[in-house]
Image (spheres, coloured by chain):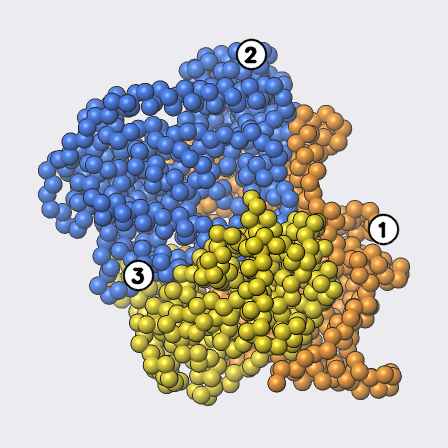
Amino acid sequence: MAESDGSAQDTRRRFEQWAKNPRCAANAASAILNIPMVEVARAEGAKVPFGQSPFALARGQSFERAMFKDDAAVLRADLVAAGVLPASARGFADFRFKRNGGPFAKVDDALASTTKWLGELASGRLDRTLAAGATIRIPGGVMLPHATLCIDATAVVLRDGVPTLVVGEVKVYPDRGGYTDETQLATSRAQAGMYVHGLRLVLQEAKLDHKVAVSATGFLVLSRSGSNRISIRANEDFEGQAERARTGLSTLSSVAQALKLAPNAGLPVIQKAEVSYCEACVSFCERADSCRDRAAASGDGAVLGDEVQRFLGEVPLARVRQLASGAKPANEHEREIVRMLATTEGANGR
Amino acid sequence: MAAERDTALRLRAYLAGGPIARLEHRPIAVPPAKDRMLAAFVRMGGESSPWAVGWKRGRRAIEIRTVPEARRRSDVAVMVADFGDELCSHFESAEGALRQLWIPGSTHAEMLHFIALRYSRAKKADPELLARLNRTGRRCGQMFDATQNPNSVLCIDLTARLREMFAFPCEPVRENHLGHLLAWLGPDGKEGRAKLAKDAEVFAVSTSLDPELERVLAPAVEAWNDAQTDAARRPHADRIRKALESEIRRRLELLEAGLEIYDDAAGENPGAALISSSSMQELTRFEGSEAYHSDGGFVRSPETDHSPTTAAMSYAQKDADMIAARAALVPFDRACQAELLAEGNAFAGDVLSVETVVIGTKTIRKQLTVATDGALPLRLREQDSVVIAGDADGKGVWKIHQITPDPKGKTRTIRLVAMQANPTGPMPKRGAVGVVFHEKLDPELRRRLARMVFQTKELATDGTAPGAWILEQLAAREPSDTAPDTEHFDGTTTRVVQDG
Amino acid sequence: MADRARPTSGKSHRERLKTRMDEIALDLWNTTRKSKSVSIVSSPPGAGKTRTLVAVCAHALKARKRVGVACQTNGQADDVCQRLASEIGASRVCRFIGGNADNTPPVQGCHVESAAKDIPDGPMVIVGTTAKWALIESAPDIDHFLIDEAWQMAMASFIPLLRFCDRFILIGDPGQIPPVVSAPTERWETSMNPPHRAAPEVLRERLDVHAVSLPATWRLPHDTANLIRDFYDFEFESAALVGDRSLRFSTSKSSTVAGVDAALDRLMAHSVARVLVPMPKDGGLAQADPEVGAAAAATVVRALERKATTSATDRDIMSKELRPEDIGVAASHRVMVQSVLSHLPEKLRSAVKVDTAERWQGLERKLMVVVHPLSSMANPGEFDLETGRLCVMASRHTHGLVVVGREHIGDTLDAVLPVAAQPIGRPDAVARGLRRHRAFWQHLDESDRNS
């Protein structure tokens, strides 16, 4: 949830922005140049609603504070009940920033303190087995700065005698069992995967990776509907998302190199870059409407959704109209389009 | 919905310049206004309980309840109980008529589930309020379950039903906005509708409020929290109430307008009466159950079933409901049949011959030979049972005896043998074209499975099921009751930290 | 033409495996005989599931017990009856049928009954479908219960069987395509006992079961076993050793489809080859990809034109001509199936089975041509990344497998950033599928580089 400084927030946010539509060059340029697409949209005259719900932000903060109050008493009890921590686990390490209720005013202090804690674990001292806001810095790629990550919650358990970090992601959305919003779950797991990957890198860099392990499974901390209580879901599989973070960051770096963007390149570069509209754009990109208009003008099937685009491929909608009006198909793909339209009618013959 | 058919329909809608009907008939009954209740919610950002709720019963005026501070759990509880009283009364006063609750879309269904999760098994409150809240939670749970069940029409998610009824010339993600869909279905010409649909998206219809509005309301909420007297609180409460009422009203008015459009869109599928009937039976069962009235006894969890037998029974029943809904609607709607064709669970063909054959030594049966399009999908196999589309009772059963692809790959020949000596249902003549045969849709097998699971549970309890030890072990590790209710309803209020 | 050395230890290798399988069957019998228990047998493709089932039944009959067997389809139940009859005699086999079903015995001498009360007394193996067993009110007395293709059976269908027996053996292939679930399952995703999931999976998680796996695939050549091992979470080998299975073709001629002859040549030394179809000139990819369909069809045609012969020394089969009936083509999408059919010469269409992966389950051919599920997919989704289909398609052959697909597949796999939207507590199947897909493709890359 809360993170330390602009560059930290940026790198993770920018990675996730790019990952939502990696085929769009403009999206990639925006992520690499760290020029939010909302600025581009505004410069183009689009009316863009901004910001998040102030209540949602406050709720997130109060939720977290309640959980970590009194040396994380509530969180610890529920982690023990969920089987994440043993009943004998002790100690709490608070690396959060002051504005989140923690002790640290400066990023570097939180970083140093976390590094010290990791060292303690490596030396076998397990007197702080639950941490809030553990702060690490992972090396960046060519176009992206280093990323400072603040991990919502980290539990420490012994597995085969090795202190093992178990990452937890805290979210305010409610636990509805199998009905829990899958988009929210995917976002949470993506973040947790980034933390798992980050911890592994940091431990490797500090040459502590043979003394401290990072678990591929972790936990989610969600809210309970209409309540201030938390819900812990253990044994969440973060390995795939850690791998996603690893390969994705590497790919983004390669994309950055291939695009050969000057570091001080501005908005116009993004405006000139090719766009590739898809359904996902609607949920995250402030230029989605204008890109959709462009896609509609060029007859891109994406304006009817990803499945239609996948089926049509490079065949534009104008051509579909011609085929539907009796134009002779030029190849088997077009014959398939004609066949499909001919054998599928709407209910009233349309 | 088969993906390819959906793609084709979407393209057809695009070519037509507007929505086209997916179904010939409306698959659900829409009772008269007096038997309908409309409801909508809004919530504060970050919260999963209502900030305001509005409803309209029959032709009465809209009623709206709000709270100034959505994080004061006791106030929210009273509001929810008021809504619940109306909801329960709406169904309990039905006197045999089909009653329905209509909601704008999936986030409102989600809110019903939130209410169920929070209050179905709540234990701590003033006793009178607690009874009302428990009843509200359980009723909202039933309403939520109804939105997930095609064989129930007790609670209707209008956006979902419009999507079911029409193919729209837009991306699926936009079909979650009721205003967008209704704009497409409006009377304007196609150019006008596309623009109206896009413009409609500016106005939120979900339970979330526009963050801009919340930024406007945040100071009023802060001020209300800070005020020391009722008199000091009143102006802030009024300001919040007016804003929320406006939001609720807009959602309800859109819902009401959309309901009329949906009702007028097509005639009712004759099979919808069966679905209504099973909904009424389900309602009667629910209202007579311990789970609805219980004070401390077993209450079904809104989240899941952990017991292996309960889970298996309700899953089998859910499967039966899916099949029953299809069985009710398919005979009367060629578009539903087209859906089965697209899935490969049906085939359409030309009848090449109708013969009488001898099976075994003396069994005499009718045999059909049908030529079908070899390019279309076919999941049905030899020995599968099918019925002829239009056979509303589904009793004229044919068994697929042989499927022979033509070497050219363009056609396949299917031989079917009647299961009965004198088959009921439609009997096509030689030369009939485009006769549709589809999988036998029989929910009874799944219902029977549910009954056998129940029997297993009974025998295990009696100690006469040899495999009872397995059930005991499966049950032994269930989690303890995870109901959240160990806090009282007075929640803490938190100051909103305004970002700069 | 490659001339591979004849192995000398193949016979002893297979004898060892047969002994191991006999031990497994005996172990299963001993476990079920001694006490109430649940045993789960995981099997790779073509590993002798039915042989194991039949062997356990034979032990049971020797001990004068009655065994119930549940199969997932009528066809499978009939097959099991035939196998049982040849091992233990038809008079000890009873086919337990539905009320309206055809009462022709699947094998001469086998009993056929629809009512439990009519089943003869005494030691007997009673074979019916899961649907039959689950839905009857009363069952014949049985002492042990075996379930075939158990991963195709949901937990909800297993529970009613607990009325009849207290000891179960479930046998199946966990790598197959999971059964289609039509009802929405959100309500039970976080259940301790999810009714929609495969019974062996749930039982393995929730009980102390006796778990074994079959040691080897008898169908697949040795290098294919290596290829598909990543789809399973247990080890297995191939009963066929290097050189046991071979495909030989006449002298190669140039083919109008690039790479087809090279792939067939490769099959003379390995059991897996690949035909890569270059990207379309316009760069665009679409699901209905006629060039890939044509390439798959061309592979079939060339294999026959080059007068292929097959040998299987482990099965004592030498130099048999490859016929059209010995070849199969599999694809994940119906559109591709139609494309392949349209490119096959008419005379081959009825002889060469071309079908989707679902329809290939339980079948085998000497040579399989498979269109890679991700071919022509620029943006694969969850359905495409699910590996059951690929595993089924890649495990039907006894001699050779040719994988056909567009060149982009490796790059597409590299570019996938999987989304973990699975329900709470469930494993990340999309990421796991992606890992397996990548491993499969890398394996093909490495094999091409090393040849």
Residue at numbered disc 1: B295
Q: Secondary structure at mark 1?
A: loop
Q: Badge 2 sits on which subunit?
A: C
Image quadrant in which you'd find residue B455: top right
Q: Secondary structure at mark 3?
A: loop
Q: Colour of chain C?
A: blue
Q: CA distance from mark 2 to mark 3?
A: 62 Å
Q: Secondary structure at mark 2?
A: loop
Q: Nearer the viewer, mark 2 or mark 3?
A: 2
User: Residue C285 shows which numbered tag?
Assistant: 3
Q: Badge 1 sits on which subunit?
A: B
Marks 1 and 3 share the same chain: no
Marks 2 and 3 share the same chain: yes
Q: Colour of chain B?
A: orange
Which comes sooner in the sequence, label 2 or label 3?
2
Q: Colour of chain A?
A: yellow
Residue A335 left/right relative to B148: left
Q: Amino acid at mark 3?
A: Leu
Residue at numbered disc 2: C63
How busy is the neighbourhood of tag 3: few (under 14 within 10 Å), some, or many (20 plus)?
many
